Amino acid sequence: MPLDADAIVRGCKGAKVETANHLCRAEIDRFSSVAAKGGDITVACTQEAPVFSEVASEGGNATLRFANIRENAGWSKDAKAAGPKVAALLAAATVPMPEVPLVPLTSEGVILVYGRDERAIEAAKILKDHLDVTVLLSKPGAIEPLRVSEYPVAKGSVVSAQGHLGAFELTVDDYALPAASSRGKLEFGVERDGAKSRCDLILDLTGNAPLFPAHELRDGYLRVDPNDPAAVLRAVMKAGDLVGTFDKPRYITFTENLCAHSRSKIVGCNRCLNLCPTGAITPNGDHVAIDENVCAGCGACAAVCPTGAAAYALPPVDALIGKIRTLLSTYREAGGENPVLLLHDAEHGGQMIEMLARHGDGLPANVIPVSVNEVTQIGLETFAAAFAYGAASLRLLMRARPKHETGGTVRTIAYADTILKGLGFGENRVATIETDDPDELGRNLYEISAAKTVANPASFVATGRKRDVMRLSLRELQRAAPAPVDVIALPEHAPFGEIEVNAEGCTLCLACVSACPTGALSDNPEKPMLKFSEDACVQCGLCKATCPEKVISLHPQIDFRAATAEARIMKEEEPFECIRCAKPFGTKSTIERISAKLEGRHWMFQGRAQRLELLKMCEDCRVIAATEQSFDPHEAPMRAPVRTTEDYLREREETKEKP
């Protein structure tokens, strides 16, 4: 592959650049001598990373980083023009990524083989020498008894399941143990429902519906088609290896006090609950709870969370945006034009790019691949930052049949498209490529038309919480946009917007203020007033659901002036003054409304103007006035006596006796 050292020098300013023809073999001494000097070394090869790491460990304390410029750039029909992209890839390899905390899962090898017939028995025979096996047969036919009971065999049907690798709990109906005297076939004893089973692993060979949603993402649950012997054997071999302690990333960092799920048992935001494919997210009072042991890391919750309560950690959003900043700025410095970012995962996307490079035309020179853990983790802040930094287009590479729920990603793309179009970027700047065919991937990428990038790309550094990064990215996008505007209407459920309050119907009860989880709604302790700060609003809908008068409506939009705007007064009134001591209390509209509803309708106030005035007094004067008027609560009109069944029966008999 051609190496444009000049482009690399232009992009990677201050770096010493050396090229080679066979660095991992014939010229390994060159690398060894450089590594012996120590320092930071970026090697433009990932295939031979073990070789370079071994050599470096022998000669000094050099810090090695690796970048794949071959499949991502050099093996392409556009390889001669890929110098700026190579520079960008090398520069991005030096961007530090924070360590991700790990969640330990421990399996002691207790496995439940859940099947229907002898195939479950055969799988258990293979596993019995390696694991603690129990066989559960669902509605079995004629099963020949075991000659030696080396492991338990029972019958029953699993009706509910929960848990994860190392901690599964199942509820079994029709549970029964076989009789020891079974002769020609297993004879089972008395059945019972609601039996509990706990295990570390589950091998499901029933061929029935899976026990878990998104079952392929549930660690420790192995479900295969029992009619596929090869698949059964692979699952059995995999189960044999799932003993010990395993570490999985803690994909989501959750800040409970930022969650806008509910307040006072009124549900507001449920975006994450609607998207989680594994059921790892459940309501937990005013917030939600995320089971880190069940979470499969799709990142959909973090992508759509409006407050930033759920934030992705592999990597954090500010680190990912920092990498994109380095890629695009280096590409531009090296002379590259019209950059297209291709976001992909390592498992599917990495393989597709490699296949395209080895057997096809490779990636276009202006397509810069960015590997992420899951494409569904990408949120609006990443889209906004990429275009603010100078991206011309952005594509997300997905499977033809995604393993994660993509509804959140589709919705986020719709928000991004609306904003980009409103700011003059044009249409279809963000899109997905959903394919398992490398040639189709290549056709899609080569057909992307050139688009103008921003004239003055942003250079901001993204730091802080997810919501803060989103606000900053959007402001910088608007500043650099071809046709900036102040307000853009957004689709439903967008995480930005304003509220409207019907001032005539509002009584300033301020229930919405106490329900608002972000402080977007506030009051004035000095006088009856309702204020609204649009920059803090996440359109969770709690204010609308809480309002007793139903006078609040939501309007999704993004107002780029909101960050610096003062809180808007939605309604204010002069406080109502006590007619006896002139002490301010309550609001005029509330007192007048209560008085109008009770006057002439309630026995306490019928024909008694003085008592109606009690409503217009403060709490202290009301007590004094009630005492002066000798108010007797027992003078209320007598209630009708309670009627019992005996009364109705007596009246019926009396009616029958009348001629």
Image (spheres, grey):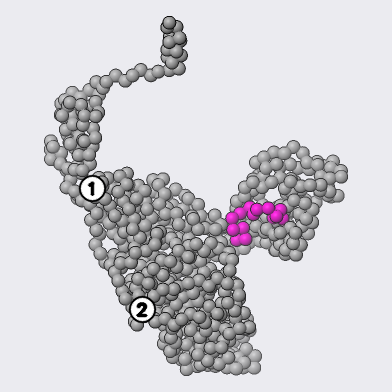
Q: For the residues marked 1 and 2, what is the alpha-carbon distance in whole angstroms?
A: 45 Å
In this view, the residue farthest toward the front is 659
- How busy is the neighbourhood of tag 2: few (under 14 within 10 Å), some, or many (20 plus)? many
- The reply to whether discs 1 and 2 touch (Cβ–Cβ < 8 Å) is no
> Residue 618 is drawn in which quadrant?
top left
In this picture, residue 197 sits left or right of residue 395: right
Q: Is residue 475 above or below residue 223?
A: below
- In terms of depth relative to the viewer, which is nearer, 104 or 68? 68
Q: Residue at x 81, y 48 (%)?
A: 143
Horizontally, is 439 left or right of 484 in the view? right
Q: Is residue 371 magenta?
A: no
Q: Is residue 210 magenta?
A: yes
Q: Helix, strand, or loop for circle 1?
A: loop
Residue under numbered circle 1: 504
Residue depicted at 53% across the width and 62% down the height? 405
Q: Nearer the viewer, residue 312 or 74?
A: 74
Residue 338 at x, y percent in the picture: 43, 83
- Segment colored magenta: 204-218
Type of residue at label 2?
Answer: Ala
* Residue drawn at point x = 28 percent, y = 47 percent: 510
- Per the image, the residue denoted by label 2 is 458
Tell me which label, 1 or 2, sits earlier in the chain.
Answer: 2
Q: As drawn, is 318 to the left or to the right of 148?
A: left
The secondary structure that dominates the magenta segment is loop
Q: Which quadrant holds the C terminus? A: top left
Kindly indicate the quadrant of the structure image that contains residue 122: bottom right
Give residue 345's position: percent from left, percent from top.
55, 72
- Image location (x, y in percent) of residue 640: 33, 19
Quarter assignment of residue 400: bottom right
SS for dot 2: loop
